[in-house]
Image: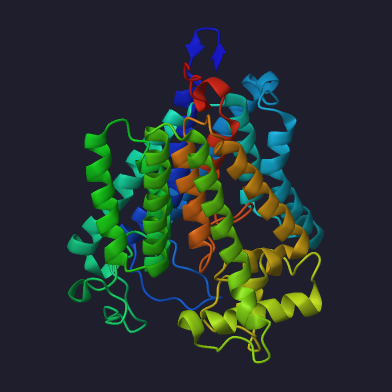
Amino acid sequence: MQRGRLFISCDAAAVLLIALLWSRAVGARIALSLTADKVFVPVGQEPIWPAAASAISSLSFLLAVGLSTLIVVFRINEITRPGLWRLLVLLAPWLVILTRTVYEGSPSPESVLYLVVILALAALRPSPRVLGALGALVVLTAIAAIAFGFLQPDAGRVREADGTVRERLDKAVFPSLGLLQGMFTAENILGLYLSIGIAAVIMLPRWRLRIPGLIIVGFAICWSSSRIAMAAAAGMLMVGALTWACRRYGYDRAASVVARLIVMGAMAVMCVLPLTGWLTSGGWDDDALTGRGVIWNGSLTEWSSQAPVLGLGRDWFAQVAETDTSPLSPGAFSGHNQFVQWLATGGVVLAAVAVTSLLVQAFATTTPKSRHLSTAAMLMTGILVCGWLEVPLGFIDNAAFWSVTVVPLAVLFLSRPSDSQDEVRAP
């Protein structure tokens, strides 16, 4: 951006925007952990959110919206340079669920934030190298989470409703240390954020930074004992290693095929898994997959019987949690599967548009000539594998994960050809 003597590079502006989104998601929760007693709050009740955390969250939100708006105003002519079709791919799921939400009369602040962030990134078209800054923030998040676990265990480790440290001998990787939640309010949230963030850690500029970063993040994920996060991290490293090896020996097309097959496989599992049990005569066992069976049964039954086309609305899970006749488990605050979440909140329309959007992004960023093919494949794999049992991706909500999901996806998808494609090899 440039006006008079004021100049800031596109990459620097993108890094600042990433930092603001990270501050809203992680910085505010660090303040929460330092200034409040993190106790169990039943779903449907008002969450604990002290003044310091609220101030950081609100200020980061306003600065992110302000910076994004400023970028759009200063670079209005650049917004369509990536191609209108790319903007449509990124904004289509947002537009579907926003239309459904506006019809209900319950839009959220994240609705505005998502739009201006995507438009700002389209106007900037930063180099994918800026994801190295995000990688540093992911490592910093892991370090802070580990510090909370050791130095402030009341905040950093998961506790039961009565305040005692939760002991899950069947789950904990380190039974004597409990389950790490760090600055977040659940071990799975920390695990998801860090595992998907591994794709950004790989973008750190040198191996002497990447390896220690991966070790730190890996330790935090293992301490959280989030099984889906560990599976996602393993899958990401596997696809990264396979595609890197193919490219290292000159098999660019094979690397692209491997990446796309793995992404499509992860997507298929995400979409089919909850349906396999629900479509049987008895449905899922209520206790299947740590209680997700009852959530999938209830969510899919309510969706299919009440609003199969447009869904039940973005805040349906919050609404049913407040009733005494909820068809879900008492602890259900989401569909605990990305596809179930899309169906329940936005129906077949949102699910179809969102799946199509992700597949288009995956294919566009994993072409044989793509310089960041491995990073794109790892990122998409991480999001989709986490989506098997959790909900890492949102378009007008779930903003806590945007810095490791929405932003890197958009950066890779919107990047300039000179930044995203390798030079053609000489024969």
Judge whether 177 appears above or below 349 on screen: below
Residue 120: where, in percent of width, then height?
Answer: 60, 31
Judge whether 325 appears above or below 19 on screen: below
Question: Position of 315 compared to 130: left or right?
Answer: right
Q: Quadrant of residue 365?
A: top right
Q: Quadrant of residue 361?
A: top right
Q: Residue at x 60, y 83 (%)?
A: 328
Q: Residue at x 56, y 55 (%)?
A: 393
Q: Residue furthest bottom?
A: 282
Judge whether 409 appears above or below 281 on screen: above
Residue 249: where, in percent of width, then height?
Answer: 38, 34
Question: Position of 100 compared to 146: left or right?
Answer: right
Q: Nearer the viewer, residue 68 or 177?
A: 177
Q: Quadrant of the N terminus?
A: top right
The number of numbered discs placed on residues in the rendered structure image is 0
Question: Position of 216 compared to 282: left or right?
Answer: left
